[in-house]
Amino acid sequence: MSGFSRFYVFGGQGGFEGADGVNPIALMILQGEGNRQWFEALYVDPELSRLGAVQTVMPAGPDHPDGLLDATIAFFPQPFAECPSLAAVRDALGETECLDFDAAPDKIPAAWAELREQARPIFAGLNVWLADLVPINGT
């Protein structure tokens, strides 16, 4: 049975220079584990929306270095609005619900690699927190 192993929280820095964690929370990107790793989004801020109809992002491999970046572009495209390739990717996606960089890389929009490089410096400036999910009792 598959389940979630960690999540990434995107939002503002709470307290003085972020000393108090994240506040407000904009969204969480959940990382799932099973026979393959995947990402999906959980929105807190109702103003946010995903790129097209994308519901799931499957990285090229477990813990792939671009996995979170790809998921962030798909689930939190707002910071990347000025990237020249974003519109082409959005148009090419159409009603695509799953971006599978592993089993279906031929179905990833051709402009995605360019968008990824345009988005990389913006992503580096986002406020992101990581939480590994570990049981605290019972196991």
Image: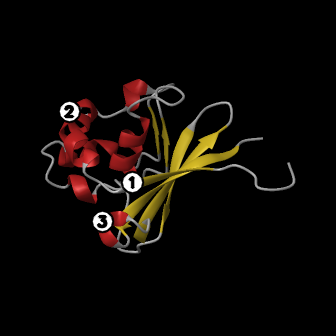
When the figure is inspected, residue 131 is found, relative to residue 88, above or below; the finding is: below
Question: Sequence-wise, which precedes: disc 3 or disc 2?
Answer: 3
Question: Sequence-wise, which precedes: disc 2 or disc 1?
Answer: 2
Circle 2 or circle 1, nearest the eye: 1
* Residue type for callout 2: Glu
Say which element carries label 2.
helix
Q: Position of residue 96 (x, y in %)?
A: 42, 45
How would you rate the neighbour count of disc 3 (Cα within 10 Å): few for under 14, some for 14-19, many for 20 or more? few
Q: Is residue 94 visible in this depiction of the protein? A: no
Name the residue tied to disc 2.
Answer: 114
Q: Is residue 62 visible in this depiction of the protein? A: yes
* Residue type for callout 1: Val
Circle 3 or circle 1, nearest the eye: 3
Colour scheme in use:
secondary structure
Which quarter of the figure is the N terminus placed in?
Answer: top right
Q: Residue at x 26, y 59 (%)?
A: 78
49 on left or right of 87: right
Say which element carries label 3.
helix
Q: Position of residue 98 (x, y in %)?
A: 48, 42
When the figure is inspected, residue 100 is found, relative to residue 85, above or below; the finding is: above
Q: Residue at x 36, y 32 (%)?
A: 108
When the figure is inspected, residue 54 is found, relative to residue 26, above or below; the finding is: above
Confirm or deny contact between disc 3 and disc 1 (CB under 8 A). Answer: no
Name the residue tied to disc 3.
Answer: 17
Name the residue tied to disc 1.
Answer: 128
Q: Position of residue 29 (x, y in %)?
A: 48, 53
Circle 3 or circle 2, nearest the eye: 3
Q: Residue at x 70, y 49 (%)?
A: 134
